[in-house]
């Protein structure tokens, strides 16, 4: 782990609607608020992270598709957001074609990793400071274990798994963990699971509490202490093109994402200390 290389966290779960994008946007905003220089890489053809950050279609003339398929440098895809220190590499529906277009190429799984490393190297060499040096890169994955997600896992230091507090929460998790193991064996030997974040917790629903204790008893320390509550302000914010933290900083969802950011930074410090020892 070198100082010049950003920490790359991939938000992955092949289950749809579990809070990957909401977590990417709000964790990204929270990390930026505490002083980190953050990039959100939107790899989902749905482009929800880009839309939720207020990036309209016209500002997506260069997207992550061009980076993955067209060898366009990451810097050309970067778009500033309304949040200071938060940048996004947007996605478009073109990403639906990635699987077919690069399937035959030997480096198909490493496209994102190469782009991120090349950008970090350029930033490190650029004494003018014109090239942004990101400290955190969050990759928002589509709800699938396809080549886009594999690119994210091959580029990542760690995986962050959002898990919705619902009856079938654990279903599908073992398949996800198996994929991580496969990527680790074949593409990225140092890949780790950073943590599991429980989302959309509803305190009025007994089931939510049951899910929390089930997931904690199965997954132990991997599960972050912080739980993201179900909060209507969090779900309204994207339609204003804003992170919840800008839309309503005081709401319980925003406060939970701030807490999650500091928990993640603490885990990172412990990891760094363990690696240095
Ligand atoms: N804490 C929350 N409180 C209330 N609503 C939430 C919360 N987190 C997410 N949602 C809502 O749940 C829906 C799914 O969330 P999100 O888009 O983040 O999931 P996702 O895993 O990225 O979905 P997909 O798999 O389709 O990419 C969205 O409508 C979002 O606004
Ligand atoms: Mg999403």
Image: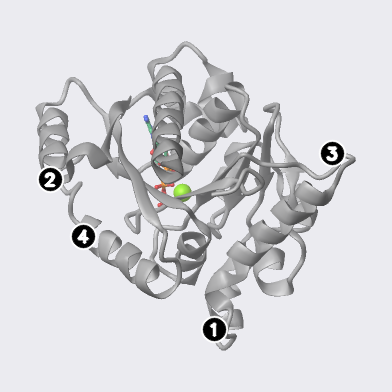
Label 4, on which residue?
174
The answer to whether residue 201 shows anywhere in this view is: yes
Q: Secondary structure at mark 3?
A: loop
Q: Position of residue 238 (x, y in %)?
A: 54, 33
How crowded is the residue under tag 3: few (<14 C-alpha within 10 Å), some, or many (20+)? few
Q: Are marks 2 and 3 in contact (CB under 8 Å)?
A: no
Q: Position of residue 87 (x, y in %)?
A: 68, 40
Question: What is the spatial separation of the Cα atoms under label 3 and label 1, in whole angstroms?
Answer: 36 Å
Label 3, on which residue?
129
Question: What is the spatial separation of the Cα atoms under label 2 and label 3, in whole angstroms?
Answer: 46 Å
**In the image, is the residue at mark 2 within 8 Å of ligand 1 by its beta carbon?**
no
Q: Secondary structure at mark 2?
A: helix
Disc number for residue 218: 2
Question: What is the spatial separation of the Cα atoms under label 3 and label 4, in whole angstroms?
Answer: 43 Å
Residue situated in front as seen by the camera: 261 or 274: 274
Whichever of callouts 1 and 2 sits on the residue coming sooner in the sequence is 1
Callout in the foreground (1, 2):
2
Which residue shows up at 21% across the image and 60% down it? 174
Whichever of callouts 2 and 3 sits on the residue coming sooner in the sequence is 3
Whichever of callouts 1 and 4 sits on the residue coming sooner in the sequence is 1
Disc number for residue 103: 1
């Amino acid at each position: 782990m070198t100082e010049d290389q950003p920490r790359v966290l991939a938000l992955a779960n092949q289950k749809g609607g579990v809070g990957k994008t909401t977590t990417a946007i709000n964790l990204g905003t929270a990390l930026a608020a505490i002083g980190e220089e953050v990039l959100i890489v939107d790899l989902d053809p749905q482009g929800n992270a880009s839309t939720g950050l207020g990036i309209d279609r016209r500002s997506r003339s260069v997207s992550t598709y061009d980076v993955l398929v067209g060898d366009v440098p990451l810097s050309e895809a970067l778009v500033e957001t309304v949040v200071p220190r938060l940048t996004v590499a947007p996605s478009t529906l073109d990403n639906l074609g990635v699987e077919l277009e690069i399937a035959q190429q030997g480096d198909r799984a490493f496209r994102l990793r190469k782009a991120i490393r090349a950008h970090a190297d350029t930033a490190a060499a650029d004494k003018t400071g014109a090239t942004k040096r990101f400290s955190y890169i969050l990759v928002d994955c589509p709800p699938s274990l396809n080549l886009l997600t594999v690119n994210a896992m091959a580029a990542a230091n760690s995986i962050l798994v959002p898990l919705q507090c619902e009856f079938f929460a654990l279903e599908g998790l073992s398949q996800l963990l198996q994929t991580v193991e496969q990527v680790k064996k074949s593409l990225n030997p140092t890949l780790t699971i950073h943590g599991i974040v429980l989302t959309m917790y509803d305190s009025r629903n007994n089931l939510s509490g049951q899910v929390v204790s089930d997931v904690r008893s199965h997954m132990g320390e991997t599960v972050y202490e912080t739980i993201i509550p179900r909060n209507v302000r969090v779900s309204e914010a994207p339609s204003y093109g804003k992170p919840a933290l800008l839309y309503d900083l005081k709401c319980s969802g925003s406060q939970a994402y701030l807490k999650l950011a500091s928990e993640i930074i603490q885990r990172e410090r412990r990891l760094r200390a363990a690696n240095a020892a």
